[in-house]
Amino acid sequence: MNTEVTIPVYNEENDLPKCIERLTKFLGEQKLFESSIVIADNASTDRTWEIAQELERQYPNVKALHIPKKGRGLALRTVWSQSKADIVSYMDVDLSTNLKFYPLLIHGISVYYDLAVGSRLMQASRIKRSLKREVLSRGYNAMIKGMFWNRFSDAQCGFKAVRRDIAHKLLPHIKNNNWFFDCEMMLLAENHGFKIFEVPVEWIDDLDSRARIGPSIVEHSSGLVRMRLAGFRQPL
């Protein structure tokens, strides 16, 4: 079984080298699966793309891909559509989620789940973040539950893995190319009977996150309303 980890980046010249150093070291110590890394640069305006190319030359299991438009969802869509790995996955460049939980994602899929996702809202999770972000996260996930009666607990944790064949079935039906991409993918997957494995995580808030709360709230809320009004039971 082989896995591919996508790291979507936009203007991350400071965090990217540290991320790839830690991630390649960690993945190199895993014996149960082979892995590779794709740095997906979303039209960065700093030295991120230059650094990504340097890292590609430095590490044999790292590939750098330049995408000329912004959007985390677009980055994942582009990389996953091209992937030949058995399992496609992604995590945020700040590595807010402790890497020791990544093998649990892969284990979940190896025991016949279709998607495996980190959840900061499970009882066993250990989270360090501001009260404001905690309230917003719980409120947003409660809103999803109220609108869709979904079983998964956390739609937003940037720590997910998907069987490649399932990802290829879902991608054409996901309309969002930015932050709502994750939530839309999971709602579609659950609605169509795909099995989602949730993993409790240790997670520390990134104070330098590129996500902006105001626009993110608008994007997620409008995405949920769109899906609720349109329905999403089309065949995959």
Image: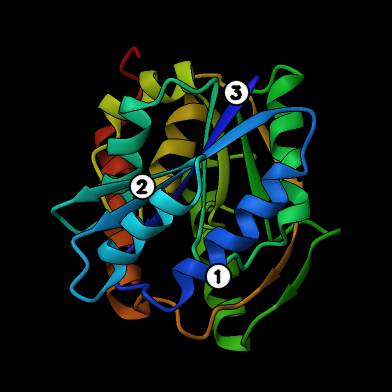
Q: Image height check: is 19 above or below 68?
A: below
Asked whether 207 or 20 is in front, the reply is 20
Residue visible at 24% across and 58% down in the picture:
42
Q: Residues within 10 Å of mark 3 (few under 14, many from 20)?
A: many
Disc 2 versus disc 1: nearer the observer: 1
Q: Going by the image, does 143 lie left or right of 66?
A: right
Residue 22: x %, y % from top left? 64, 61
- Residue placed under numbered mark 1 in the picture: 18
Asked whether 28 or 147 is in front, the reply is 28
Q: Image height check: is 60 above or below 96?
A: above
| Secondary structure type for disc 1 | helix
Asked if the residues shown at circle 3 and circle 1 are in contact, with their CB atoms under 8 angstroms apart, the answer is no
Asked if the residues shown at circle 2 and circle 1 are in contact, with their CB atoms under 8 angstroms apart, the answer is no
Alpha-carbon distance for marks 2 and 1?
26 Å
Identify residue type, mark 2.
Phe
The numbered mark, 2 or 3, whose residue comes first in the sequence reads 3
